[in-house]
Image: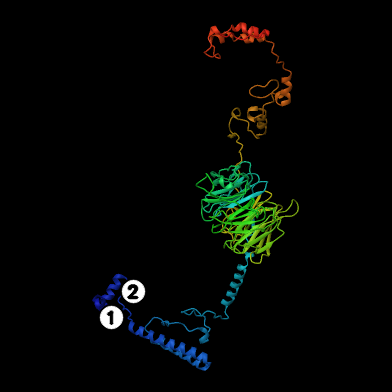
């Protein structure tokens, strides 16, 4: 059915005469007004398309069959017939503006033998098909890049570094919040410093310094899983929890040291060694102490510990835990002890250990760190016997791998896994002027040393590889905290502050008097122009009020709350007081009788049972006593 014709017939106004069309075109300004619309036979188009699709499908099937039988001549005829069909189908649709494209799946190039550059419309090539084109070379390059990406050493961010000056003593604790925006460092100088990467400039200054535990060394710092509070473990027996800005939130109670069973007291009674937050519960954390216990705490209750784990030796005696940690799922509690054992409990069962290794490290050495891999199947331990070991908790009798010769002089030297779980990182210590402390990388599978970084001429104490930033934080024995990053592989963190310029320091400006120079003024009104402020500064130096000249020392006796020179030391004070004569030449009898009248009028020190008539003459009594006579009061 001719739809265009029916539309035109339904509107008679379109069938006006040529004269009326010309008049309307001249009035309206249309150049092609009145031209007939082009008509399309939709049924013919659909029928032609259907026949073309059927023929093309038959040709593809025939070509595939003939290729299998090896008849190459017949393939050439089929391709020529296909070209004739394509040309005939194009001539049949002469009414259209251009030849309509064939609808249906295209013929693969390997079947037709054509190497045209036209993009075929249809399903992609079958899997495994490869041709000798430039795209294959690009694919080879991509494969090489993938091989490089599979190498975990290439992912170590060590091309750039920044140095944060914490102080002059050992940086013994590091912590990054989960987002990586803030860094907290603690050291042997009792200070805890807060660093904000987004707020720092190239000067790299901390925005806050506090001493939360007074005169105790900071041993461990860690942000909670939400990043709103910080656990501070120091050398005293009470752990503290601070908020993000360093203000106190909670302090754990101290236990009673005279109670024999440590589970019956409410807190630790000796110095803390380590602590960490629960990986799933935001209000629970754990600490271990020299009192031989590992305790879990609840942030909402600061009256008593939550649970108490007591590590024991083979003979059942108390041993000291030196480090503790949770498993990645939070179901296990692990502790490394001073007798070289590693003991693991179920978090809800504190009586018996679930896993126990008696000879994990050398007895008498401090196991400084325990950490679980991200997949939760491997446990890494850093021992005071200069070793690094990995363990499979499903087979906890012997270690999977052992690395030796890693010197550790600090009781908090730690280790950590890389974000992809393929590398294991730890630090080494050195003696003074005997080399540099290093950051050593081991392959987790083969446990071969694959990389190392020279950090500084002091021991490497703490190392932390943040998974989101892909940056490595290092704490050293000479008071430095270093951050290693890569501009391409790392994100935010140290990259935010190194690009900022240093803020200009505000200097005190010397304000001098402004002079108005009028060349044509009379000489009597002219003022001498002050060419330099040197003479004025010399005059101000002589003025004690302007120069804040200190007061001279006091000679003679002290006055106005100031101590004189001769009384400023203990020896001079003693010499001065020895020369003073403090002998009392007064009459003792007169000193006693001075209070006789007051005592007779107001007998405050005499009981009411005694009346005046029963009392002896006090003046006579005092006189006889002084003369050495012993008289007793008369009795009724």
Q: Is residue 15 left or right of residue 101?
A: left
Residue furthest out toward the front: 636
Q: Quadrant of residue 626?
A: top right
User: In the rendering, at what x and y percent does residue 334 appear?
Assistant: 59, 56
Q: Position of residue 131 (x, y in %)?
A: 56, 81
Q: Is residue 501 visible?
A: no
- Label ID, residue 5: 1
Under circle 2, the secondary element is loop
Res 524 seen here: yes
Q: Is residue 47 above or below residue 415?
A: below
Q: Position of residue 22 (x, y in %)?
A: 28, 75
The residue lying at 69 percent from left, 61 percent from top is: 403
Compared with 597, 133 (above or below) is below
Q: 627 or 593: nearer the eye?
A: 627
The residue beneath circle 2 is: 31
Quarter of the image with the N terminus is bottom left
Closer to the chain start, of discs 2 and 1, is 1
Q: Which mark lies nearer to you, 2 or 1?
A: 1
Left or right, residue 90 beside residue 353:
left
State the residue lying farthest toward the right: 434
Packing grade of label 1 (10 A; few <14, some 14-19, many >=20) is some
Residue 263, how many percent across, how many down? 57, 48
Q: Are marks 2 and 1 in contact (CB under 8 Å)?
A: no
Q: What coloring was used for the rendering?
A: rainbow
Q: Nearer the viewer, residue 277 or 87?
A: 277
Q: CA distance from mark 2 to mark 1?
A: 23 Å
Element at label 1: helix
Q: How many marks?
A: 2
The quadrant of the image that shows the C terminus is: top right
Q: Is residue 38 above or below residue 573?
A: below
């Amino acid at each position: 059915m001719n739809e265009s014709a029916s539309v035109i017939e339904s509107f008679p106004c379109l069938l006006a005469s040529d004269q009326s069309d010309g008049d309307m075109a001249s009035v309206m300004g249309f150049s092609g007004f009145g031209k007939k619309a082009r008509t399309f036979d939709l049924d013919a188009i659909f029928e032609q398309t259907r026949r073309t699709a059927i023929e093309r499908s038959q040709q593809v099937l025939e070509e595939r069959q003939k290729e299998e039988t090896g008849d190459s001549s017949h393939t050439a005829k089929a391709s020529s017939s296909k070209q004739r069909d394509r040309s005939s189908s194009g001539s049949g649709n002469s009414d259209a503006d251009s030849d309509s494209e064939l609808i249906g799946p295209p013929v693969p190039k390997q079947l037709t033998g054509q190497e045209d550059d036209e993009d075929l419309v249809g399903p992609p090539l079958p899997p495994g098909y490869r041709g000798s084109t430039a795209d294959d070379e690009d694919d080879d390059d991509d494969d090489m890049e993938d091989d490089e990406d599979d190498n975990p050493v290439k992912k170590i961010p060590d091309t750039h570094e920044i140095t944060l000056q914490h102080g002059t003593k050992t940086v013994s604790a590091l912590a990054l919040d989960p987002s990586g925006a803030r860094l907290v460092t603690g050291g042997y100088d009792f200070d805890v410093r807060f660093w904000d990467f987004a707020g720092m400039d190239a000067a790299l200054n901390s925005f806050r310094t506090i001493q939360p535990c007074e005169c105790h060394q900071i041993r461990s710092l860690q942000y909670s899983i939400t990043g709103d509070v910080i656990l501070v473990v120091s050398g005293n027996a009470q752990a503290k929890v601070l908020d993000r800005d360093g203000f106190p939130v909670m302090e754990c109670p101290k236990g009673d040291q005279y109670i024999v069973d440590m589970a019956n007291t409410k807190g630790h009674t000796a110095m803390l060694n380590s602590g960490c937050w629960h990986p799933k519960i935001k209000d629970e954390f754990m600490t271990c102490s020299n009192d031989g216990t590992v305790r879990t705490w609840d942030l909402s209750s600061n009256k008593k510990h939550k649970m108490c784990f007591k590590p024991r030796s083979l003979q059942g005696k108390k041993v000291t835990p030196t480090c503790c940690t949770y498993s990645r799922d939070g179901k296990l509690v692990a502790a490394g002890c001073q007798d070289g054992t590693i003991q693991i409990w179920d978090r809800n069962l504190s009586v018996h250990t679930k896993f126990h290794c008696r000879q994990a490290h050398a007895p008498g050495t401090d196991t400084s760190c325990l950490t679980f891999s991200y997949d939760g199947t491997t446990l890494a331990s850093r021992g005071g016997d200069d070793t690094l070991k990995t363990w499979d908790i499903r087979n906890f009798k012997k270690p999977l791998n052992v690395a030796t010769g890693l010197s550790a002089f600090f009781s908090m030297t730690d280790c950590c896994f890389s974000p992809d779980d393929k590398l294991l990182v730890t630090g080494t210590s050195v003696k003074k002027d005997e080399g540099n402390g290093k950051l050593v990388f081991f392959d987790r599978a083969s446990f071969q040393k694959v990389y190392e970084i020279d950090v500084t001429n002091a021991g490497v104490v703490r190392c932390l590889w943040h998974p989101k930033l892909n940056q490595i934080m290092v704490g050293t024995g000479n008071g430095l905290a270093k951050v290693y990053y890569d501009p391409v592989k790392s994100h935010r963190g140290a990259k935010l502050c190194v690009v900022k310029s240093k803020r200009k320091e505000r200097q005190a400006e010397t304000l001098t008097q402004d002079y108005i120079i009028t060349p044509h003024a009379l000489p009597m009104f002219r003022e001498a122009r002050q060419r330099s402020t040197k003479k004025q500064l010399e005059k101000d130096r002589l003025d004690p009020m302007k120069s804040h000249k200190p007061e001279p020392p006091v000679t003679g006796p002290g006055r106005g709350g100031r101590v004189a020179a001769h009384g400023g030391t203990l020896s001079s004070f003693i010499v001065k007081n020895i020369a003073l004569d403090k002998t009392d030449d007064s009459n003792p009898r007169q000193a006693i009788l001075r209070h006789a009248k007051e005592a007779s009028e107001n007998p405050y020190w005499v009981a009411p049972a005694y009346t005046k008539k029963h009392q002896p003459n006090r003046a006579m009594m005092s006189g006889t006593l002084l003369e050495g006579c012993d008289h007793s009061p008369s009795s009724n």
